[in-house]
Image (spheres, rainbow, N blue to C red):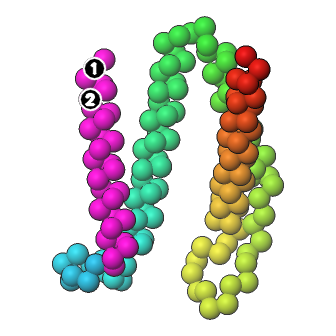
Amino acid sequence: MKLVGYISQGVMIILMVLSVVLMGLSATEASDEALATADGSWTGMVITWAIVVFAIGLIGAAGSYVVGAFVDTSNLLKSAIVVIGAVALVAICWALADGTPLPLIGYEGSENVPVWLKIADTGLFLGYIAAVVAVVSIVVSEVVQLFR
């Protein structure tokens, strides 16, 4: 079990170092021809890296959740309820999302379409809900500790 801890810590350090290097390159907009990307900007690569790190985290969290559910089968029903609730929350946020294309002056890109706008809105709604739940849980836990 210690080996898993060492491996995860090593992977975390590698991901952190790569993230810091990419953010530094993006912040300085590397002028060296050997380091510059095709358009001269590192922003696209940083966005891609953020998506990759998010996907790794999502797969890791889902994988550990599934393994934990099957290791302790007494919690299998609770785990299924949590997964169904998460899917329902995403579905509700998707239904609330508006896919109306935005009138952006001078924008010629291909991302101003209903599908991408609904995905962005869904992510924003999920972020808002997560922020509210975090604040409420902090306040409730502090109040409960006050009365103990």
Q: Which corner quadrant of the image does residue 109 belong to?
A: bottom right
Other residues around mark 2 within 10 Å, as few (<14) / some (14–19) / many (≥20): few
The residue lying at 62 percent from left, 91 percent from top is 106
Name the residue furthest left: 34
- Give the number of marks: 2
Q: Position of residue 136 (x, y in %)?
A: 74, 38
Q: Is residue 42 above or below residue 138?
A: below
Q: Is residue 147 left or right of residue 50?
A: right
> To which residue does mark 2 refer?
6
Instruction: Give the amino acid type for the residue marked by disc 2 in the picture.
Output: Tyr
Q: Report helix, strand or loop for mark 2.
A: helix
Q: Considering depth in this image, is 147 or 118 the residue closer to the camera?
A: 147
| Residue carrying label 1 | 2
Pointers 1 and 2 in contact (CB under 8 A)? yes
Q: Which residues are magenta?
A: 1-29
Pointer 1 local density, CA inside 10 Å: few below 14, some 14–19, many at least 20:
few
From this view, report whether residue 84 is shown above or below residue 13.
above
The outermost residue toward the top is 74
For this orientation, the residue located farthest to the bottom is: 106
